[in-house]
Amino acid sequence: MSATPLAQLLLLGQGTDLASERGVSCTGDLPEASDPTLVARATAAKKALGSKVLVLGHHYQRDEVIQFADITGDSFKLAQAAAAQSEAEYIIFCGVHFMAESADILTGPHQKVILPDLAAGCSMADMATAAQVEQCWQDLEKLGVARKTVPVTYMNSSAAIKSFTGEHGGTICTSSNAEKTLRWAFEKAEKVIFLPDQHLGRNTAVNDLGLTLEDCVVWNPWKPQGGLTENEIKDAKMILWRGHCSVHGRFTKASIDEFRVRIPEINIIVHPECQNEVVSAADYVGSTEKIIKTVSEAAPGTQWAVGTELNLVSRLAAANPDKEVYFLDRTVCYCSTMNRIDLPHLVWALESLVSGKVVNEIKVDSETARYSKMALEQMLAL
Ligand code: 13P
Ligand code: SF4
């Protein structure tokens, strides 16, 4: 599916994918997007590779890519899929950089993980750098708070931040298991530092665990001591990193209110990366996998407004012709970095493998992988 001209315009301003830091992805070998043989080429290359290749596709990927995925899922399901299978020599990850890093950490040394476009980062993951998180932890140590605090880090983070989490006895969470991981963390410690999505952290703490908004403070990595006073830090139960998703953060309560006026019987379902007032005003909240399940299993004739990425919502609408499925806010656009993985990049990655060349391999260094793996395995064990 290609973006509408308006969406394309909006995409230009969205996200900070730090592509330049990750290197240039393709050096001119990409097939033209207009090449009418792309589907046939991808099919042939996949067939030639057989069981040597496994294509994983996140739900936010384009239709043209998702049709070639062996497994589709949310980030939790795809991490489980990567950890569970050891046969495929090559895993082509159609998703974003942090997901491919996690797959590399969870797969065996004989397996290679490929991200078809290295510019497919995640603006939220880029909002917490390892140096900023180290500085924050040092500040918490100085105040005597670190020893009472356990880190819980959202999957949408770099391997370096996951490694920090493992090193300090914490765990990773995804939007499918954030409640379970937070409960686990509060059994271990008085306080949690939640990285890097403030919204998922706040929504889970307040709406699922019953903490108050006042129990949560926001750590701004650009300000000394996170922009907080000593007392604010000492009194807080949840220290939320100042990060957010540039897609989900744009949904508003006003769109929910408009829908309720226009269609009183509407069901509103949103992703927990949305702001707290949006999540609190919705009827249902859940990971991408849960959103798909809830709408698919709903009674025929029901009406749904969905607040998550547009590729997923469009496919959900097409797969549920017996229901009315709307996109919650037409001013919100595709995830620009997820959309960087397109059919030309997938064909390039597949055909390169057929010719014996591994392109865009994602490799996490062994020191970083060691602690990240501890934190990821802690999550999978929960
Ligand atoms: P899920 O954990 O629901 O797959 O979400 C991943 C993501 O990037 C959401 O923005
Ligand atoms: Fe990152 Fe948001 Fe895109 Fe998910 S939708 S990959 S959190 S920018």
Image: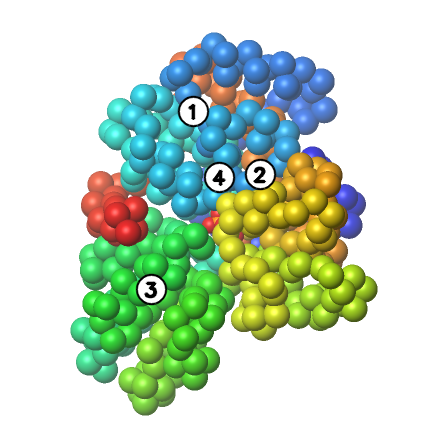
Going by the image, does 281 lie left or right of 2? Answer: left
Q: Earlier in the sequence, mark 1 or mark 3?
A: 1
The residue sitting at 33% across, 64% down in the picture is 182
Q: Which residue bears the numbered disc 2?
A: 61
Kindly state the secondary structure of the residue where label 4 is placed: strand
How crowded is the residue under tag 3: few (<14 C-alpha within 10 Å), some, or many (20+)? many
Which numbered disc flags the more N-terminal residue, 2 or 1? Answer: 1
Is the residue marked 4 within 8 Å of ligand 1, measured from its CB?
Answer: yes
**Alpha carbons under labels 3 and 4: distance apart:** 23 Å
* Number of residues whose C-alpha sits closer than 10 Å to that of mark 4, classed few (under 14), some (14–19) or many (20 or more): some
Residue at which label 3 appears: 182
Please indicate, yes or no, whether residue 251 appears anywhere in the rendered image. yes
Residue 49, above or below 30: above
Mark 2: few/some/many CA within 10 Å (<14, 14-19, 20+): many
Q: Earlier in the sequence, mark 4 or mark 1?
A: 1
> Is mark 3 in CB contact (under 8 Å) with mark 4?
no
The image's mark for residue 54 is 1
Which residue position holds label 4?
73
Give 224 or 321, whichever is nearer the viewer. 321
Q: Earlier in the sequence, mark 3 or mark 4?
A: 4
Specify the label residue 306 is tagged with. Answer: none
Looking at the rendered structure, the secondary structure element under dot 2 is loop
Comparing labels 2 and 4, the label whose residue is closer to the camera: 4
* Cα distance between the residues tagged 2 and 1: 16 Å
Q: Secondary structure at mark 1?
A: strand
| Residue at mark 1 to residue at mark 3: CA–CA distance | 32 Å
Q: Residue flagged by tag 1: what amino acid is it?
A: Leu
Residue at left offset 31%, top offset 32%: 84
Query: How many angstroms separate mark 4 from mark 1 (CA)?
Result: 14 Å
